[in-house]
Image: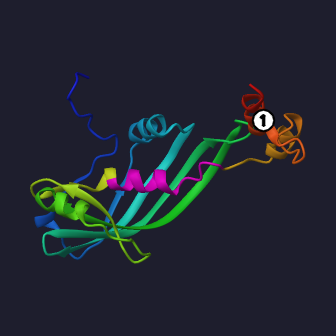
Amino acid sequence: MSEGEIASPEFSRIVDRRSVGEAPVRIGASEAECAALAKRFGLVSVERLEADIVLDIAGDDVLASGTLRADIVQSCAVSGDDLPATIEDAFSLRFVPEEDWADYEAEEVELGSEDLDALPYDGTSFDLGEAVAQSLVLAIDPFATGPDADTVRSEQGLDNAAKGGALAEALAQLKKD
């Protein structure tokens, strides 16, 4: 890919806001899309990714709320072993027209639990698949540990509170210098 060229998302489902109706939308990633998402997100694999979404028009914005479901395999944060996980996560998003995006971002707003994550869109279309992919990566526990994590911690001396662990040792060495 050349400089300035934008990569297309691995899981792209373009929706034209003019076609938004009352019926929920169901999207799912193909095997190839799952493999590409796993590579992008540093996962061992994405076995399944699907979502059911309700879309509503709010002026020029499009509101999306739904539930994503995924089966993934990630690496244990301690042992590195494969760790299968099933994710079911509700999400709510607001697609904002590109021409309004700068104003939207400039507003210093403290987000509450009822506020929606926002994504810009250009023209009349937005990428629902990429939004679901981004919601998936936010739902993954980056510190998930498997059944052997305690054993590995013990073997590596990471569970000794008095010793302080590997980070404490490294910081202590810096302090001595």
Going by the image, does 112 lie left or right of 170?
Answer: left
Residues drawn in magenta: 131-143
Residue drawn at the location 41% of the way across and 36% of the way down: 36
- Which secondary structure lies at badge 1? helix
Tell me where residue 73 appears, x and y as whole percent. Answer: 60, 43
Tell me where residue 59 appears, x and y as whole percent. Answer: 13, 75
Answer with the quarter of the image where residue 16 lies: bottom left
**Against 51, is 160 above or below?**
above
The residue under label 1 is 166
Going by the image, does 114 lie left or right of 77?
Answer: left
**Against 159, is 103 above or below?**
below
Most common SS among magenta residues: helix
Answer with the quarter of the image where residue 121 lies: bottom left
**Against 74, is 60 above or below?**
below
Q: How many marks?
A: 1
What amino acid is labelled 1 in the image? Answer: Ala
Placement of the C terminus among the 4 image quadrants: top right
Crowding near the residue tagged with mark 1, few <14, some 14–19, many ≥20 C-alpha atoms within 10 Å: some
**Against 42, is 121 above or below?**
below
Going by the image, does 61 lie left or right of 163?
Answer: left
Residue drawn at the location 74% of the way across and 47% of the way down: 146
Placement of the N terminus among the 4 image quadrants: top left
User: In this orientation, which residue lies closer to the viewer: 93 or 82?
Assistant: 93
Going by the image, does 57 lie left or right of 174?
Answer: left
Residue drawn at the location 22% of the way across and 64% of the way down: 104
Tell me where residue 93 appears, x and y as whole percent. Answer: 33, 66
Residue drawn at the location 26% of the way across and 51% of the way down: 13
Tell me where residue 98 appears, x and y as whole percent. Answer: 15, 56
User: Residue 105 colored magenta?
Assistant: no
User: In this orientation, which residue lies closer to the viewer: 156 or 61?
Assistant: 156
User: In this orientation, which residue lies closer to the viewer: 59 or 53?
Assistant: 59
